[in-house]
Amino acid sequence: MASGHDAQVAGERVETLLAELRSHAGPQVAETAEELVSCLVELYGAGLAEIVRILGDDPHGDGPRLLDRLVADPLVESLLLVHDLHPLDTDARIQRAIDQVLPQFGSHAGKVEFGGIDDQGVIHLRMEAGGHGCGSSPDAVRAAVEEAVTAAAPETAGLDIEVVEAPTELPLLQIGRRPAGLQGAR
């Protein structure tokens, strides 16, 4: 299992197998299987917590760099999130996700400002639509930002994106010298 997609497929397979056990083997077998899965998740979580602790305590200073490399892998990052072991707090992960998505759209992405997380756990973003006539629609930018932010902060309760129009740019008035042949002409 090398990618985040494979982890998602594996998770869906676990759910399917548990549902199959519930329907064919009865509730007692399904409860035992769910308890087994829960114990395995706890065991792996404890192992990951120890790995994060060891990296943090590295006397040679390589630990934080190695942890950064591990977090860069989508599968490892998702496991750290599941076990509440991610080294970055939620706000930093959200800002990082925004900063990683916008360059994909170039200067046409507009601006996205992170406004915080409210008491209900809802993320608030303010998106100033760019556009400028290119193929990147504000809807595509919004969808990409929404997907990245939701993946970066799965523990939140939702996402509210306020989309505002960018201020209209006034055309530049260019004042220059008259061509040499028109000097003195009105």
Image (spheres, rainbow, N blue to C red):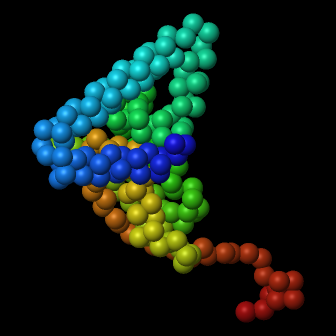
Q: Residue furthest front?
A: 25
Total numbered circles: 0
Q: Position of residue 109 (x, y in %)?
A: 51, 63
Which of the 4 image quadrants contains residue 81?
Answer: top left
What residue is at 54 percent from the left and 21 percent from the top? 64
Q: Is 14 situated above or below 172?
A: above
What residue is at 51 percent from the left and 54 percent from the top? 101
Q: In this orientation, does residue 44 appear?
A: yes
Nearest the viewer among 158 and 92 is 158
Would residue 73 appear left or right of 183 to someone viewing this image? left
Q: Position of residue 43 (x, y in %)?
A: 34, 23
Would residue 106 appear left or right of 79 to someone viewing this image? right
Q: In this orientation, does residue 166 appear?
A: no
Q: Residue furthest bottom?
A: 186
Q: Residue furthest top?
A: 59
Q: Position of residue 80 (x, y in %)?
A: 41, 32
* Quadrant in which the C terminus appears: bottom right
Q: Residue furthest right?
A: 181
Would residue 18 appear left or right of 8 to someone viewing this image? left
What residue is at 61 percent from the left and 17 percent from the top? 62
Q: Position of residue 29 (x, y in %)?
A: 18, 39
Which of the 4 image quadrants contains residue 32?
Answer: top left
